[in-house]
Image: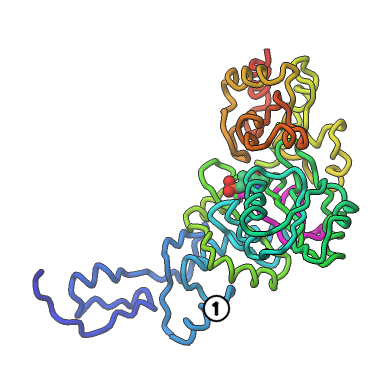
Amino acid sequence: MTESRPETSRPDTSHPEAVRSEGLRPETRVVHVPQPAVEGSRPIAMPIYQTSGFAFDDPAVMADAMGRSDGPFVYGRYTNPTVRSLEQAVAGLEGGAAAIATGSGMGAINTVLLGLLKPGDHLIAQTSLYGGTAAMINDLVGRFGIAVTYVPENDPAALRAAARPETRLVYLETISNPMTLVADLPGMCAAARELGIVSVVDNTFATGLLCRPIEHGADIVVHSTTKYLSGHTDVVGGIAVFASAELHEKVWHFAIELGASADPFAAWLSLRGMQTLALRMERHCSNARHLAGRLAAHPAVSAVHWPGLPSHPSHELAGKLLSGFGGVLSFDLAGGRPAGEKFMSSVRLALLAPSLGGVETLVLHPATTSHRSLSADELARNGIGEGTVRVAVGIEHPEDLWADLSGALA
Ligand SMILES: *Cc1c(COP(=O)(O)O)cnc(C)c1O
């Protein structure tokens, strides 16, 4: 290394254009890069703040910021401007006070479960649960000394009967997977509130566009933003939205210990996807309606599960609670498992894949994939048959989708 002149002034990185390079050696100048100030205009799209930390001018401000969820930005695990933008966007959509964005939907669910439960506590959950959540609750019971009671998603009396003095949480899903049962959010959340129990609702399938659980009494809403909120099958993420700032603050302190925080680029992809959520949901719902009607009339199909159909057990409730019936449907093939397997290998346009909520139509066979860890009893309890097929309906032209599905049924 060549000898350079010694440093004569400290770079003032607090004012981006004031970084003085005179007096600094080249090795130092390449480290302290200029950050042009954005003044007199502002970016239209939220920028990606791809920085792990933030520098302070005032040590007292820094000390204060470390312990607060609403203070200046400190460190990427706490939050970040791009991540905060997503948190505010989803909290705004859901009508919540504040949110915590996470690296996955399971990250959001576990931030809430582990942040609020302790050994000896009791949890009430609805019978039909997303597979990852069901597995996590089994772990909480097996390894963390937490008790669980399962109740139907639409039975406030069963919830009241299951409640104990040590019951801390009620866990619900707006629309269940894959049978698309709709939870009685007003009844269940009101019962939880009367008993002083915090209610948590997974709103992934509905999104804040079709249903806002906080308006129906929920305390916390969780999402896999991987699905409809992001919408383009290019990012994994999650978020927990809190009805009250107090509950948010309490869980936030745990969240920064757990470290399931969202990455700025992932948050940015979700924000970008969310801008077209309303248009996409409209098409997901209308395509699902189109396919549900056609499938119900097909001789190879013995039942179609989509809450927009009058035959669905949640139809009436869904009409009151949802402003659209969603883009996920499932159906039972009269030919059982062989017919299910044949169908899976016959679709051409629809992709055989897990997940949902993206622009592409995806199909899967729950009994051998998403719900493979369930016993035959549990499958039956959830209404999932050997010939059940789930369709996460995309935004393609409905006639192309029907041509593909009907071709695979033939
Ligand atoms: C996908 C999903 C999750 C889990 O989200 P990840 O982003 O995969 O961790 C939780 N709940 C529901 C309803 C989901 O569909």
Q: Position of residue 151 (x, y in %)?
A: 81, 48
Instruction: Give the residue number, with chain letter if any, for mark 1.
Output: 67
Q: Is residue 151 left or right of residue 97?
A: right
User: Few, some or many C-alpha atoms within 10 Å of disc 1 (few <14, some 14-19, many ≥20)?
Assistant: few
Image: 4 above or below 43: below
Q: Pick the quarter of the image with the N terminus.
A: bottom left
Image: 204 above or below 256: above
Q: Quadrant of residue 128?
A: top right
Q: Position of residue 155 (x, y in %)?
A: 87, 49
Q: Which portion, as a residue range, is magenta?
A: 207-224
Residue 320 visible, this angle: yes
User: Is residue 76 magenta-colored?
Assistant: no
Q: How is the image coloured?
A: rainbow
Q: Secondary structure at mark 1?
A: loop
Residue found at x 45% / y 62%:
49
Q: Is residue 355 left or right of residue 210?
A: left
Of residues 90 and 329, the one drawn nearer to the viewer in this rendering:
329
Q: Amino acid at mark 1?
A: Gly
Residue 278 visible, this angle: no
